[in-house]
């Protein structure tokens, strides 16, 4: 019984790469939003091989909050790897992962977690009604093209796979991430393909999002290659069906 009492209601995973100027504000905002409705949470900040002072900043934050844990490794491995690392070290009943760059408002965490009473996975979507979006036109075009490609290659019915704000049942997500292999930005696609195969109930939710940064060409190419790999693993190798059997 005591062991159960030590398990936090919510684990929040924050992947970080070279965010020395914004991560402190991000974590402060998340803490404030969590503390409004629960005192049972943990925050895992994952330093994905940053080359600036991100690690020092997040270690300073950790020293002032016992609920914050820092995970770090020296080489940049990709957002997907960072999120997976945090999730597999989390223990919360519910899991949230959210980008650390201030692009996404964290004030909806409570709404997302509350929806887990009826859904297994709740994901932010730029196309959801009531979403508040400010985004560069070039990036919107790229996002729309990518979404179309994902639906064509994977058969996913989800409108928007890529918003970096998702919540889910902790046990489900830890099982899924154990068998995931995509380290880059397209990890969300792999997550949602596996979740769909597990017949998890998924809900797309409104999000407040401001993205004015351009997207690097190399990253776009890597995402395209990763989606091809996911589709190949799924449609040709039937990899996920085999691996799902091992996690049930």
Image (cartoon, helix red, strand yellow):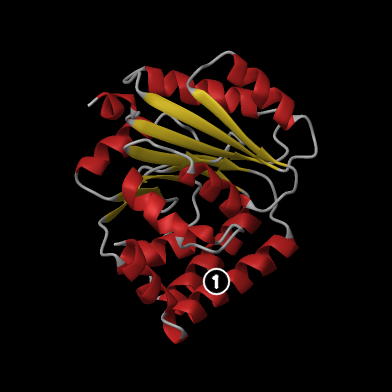
Q: Which residue is mark 1?
A: 227
> Going 39% across and 70% down the picture, which residue do you hit?
243
Query: What secondary structure is found at the residue carrying circle 1?
Result: helix
Q: How many marks on residues?
A: 1
From the viewer's perspective, tell me whether residue 84 is left or right of residue 218. Answer: left
> Going 40% across and 67% down the picture, which residue do you hit?
193
> Going 31% across and 34% down the picture, which residue do you hit?
111
- In x, y percent, where is residue 121? 32, 50
**Quarter occupied by the N terminus:** top left
Q: Is residue 170 above or below residue 78?
A: above
Q: In the displayed orientation, state which residue is furthest to the top.
A: 64
Q: Is residue 236 above or below residue 89?
A: below
Q: Is residue 236 above or below residue 111?
A: below
Residue density around tag 1, few if under 14, some if 14–19, many if 20 or more, within 10 Å? many
Q: Is residue 121 above or below residue 69?
A: below
Q: Quadrant of residue 157?
A: bottom left
- In x, y percent, where is residue 164? 51, 47
- In x, y percent, where is residue 30? 48, 26
> Going 53% across and 16% down the picture, which residue do you hit?
65
Residue 234 visible? The answer is yes
Q: In the displayed orientation, state which residue is furthest to the left.
A: 118
**Quarter occupied by the C terminus:** bottom left
Q: Nearer the viewer, residue 54 or 127?
A: 54
- In x, y percent, where is residue 88? 47, 46
Q: Nearer the viewer, residue 79 or 144?
A: 79
Q: Quadrant of residue 24?
A: top right
Residue 128 visible? The answer is no
Q: In the displayed orientation, state which residue is furthest to the bottom.
A: 236
From the viewer's perspective, tell me whether residue 18 is left or right of residue 245. Answer: right
From the viewer's perspective, tell me whether residue 7 is left or right of residue 72. Answer: left
């Amino acid at each position: 019984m005591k062991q159960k009492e030590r398990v936090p209601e919510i684990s929040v995973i924050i992947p970080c790469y070279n965010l020395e100027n914004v991560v402190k504000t991000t974590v402060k905002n998340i803490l404030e939003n969590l503390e409004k409705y629960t005192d049972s949470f943990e925050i895992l900040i994952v330093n994905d091989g940053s080359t600036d002072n991100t690690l020092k900043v997040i270690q300073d934050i950790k020293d002032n909050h016992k609920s914050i844990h820092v995970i770090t490794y020296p080489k940049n491995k990709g957002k997907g790897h960072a999120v997976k690392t945090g999730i597999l070290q989390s223990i919360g009943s519910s899991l949230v992962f959210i980008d650390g760059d201030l692009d996404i408002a964290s004030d909806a965490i409570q709404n997302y977690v509350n929806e887990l009473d009826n859904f297994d996975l709740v994901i932010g979507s730029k196309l959801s009604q009531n979403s508040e979006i400010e985004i560069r036109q070039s990036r919107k075009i790229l996002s729309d093209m990518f979404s179309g490609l994902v639906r064509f290659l994977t058969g996913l019915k989800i409108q928007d796979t890529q918003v970096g704000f998702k919540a889910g049942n902790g046990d489900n997500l830890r099982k899924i991430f154990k068998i995931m292999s995509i380290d880059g930005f397209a990890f969300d696609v792999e997550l949602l393909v596996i979740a769909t195969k597990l017949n998890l109930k998924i809900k797309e939710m409104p999000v407040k999002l401001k993205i004015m940064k351009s997207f690097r060409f190399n990253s776009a190419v890597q995402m395209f290659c990763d989606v091809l790999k996911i589709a190949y693993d799924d449609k040709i190798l039937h990899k996920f069906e085999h691996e799902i059997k091992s996690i049930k």
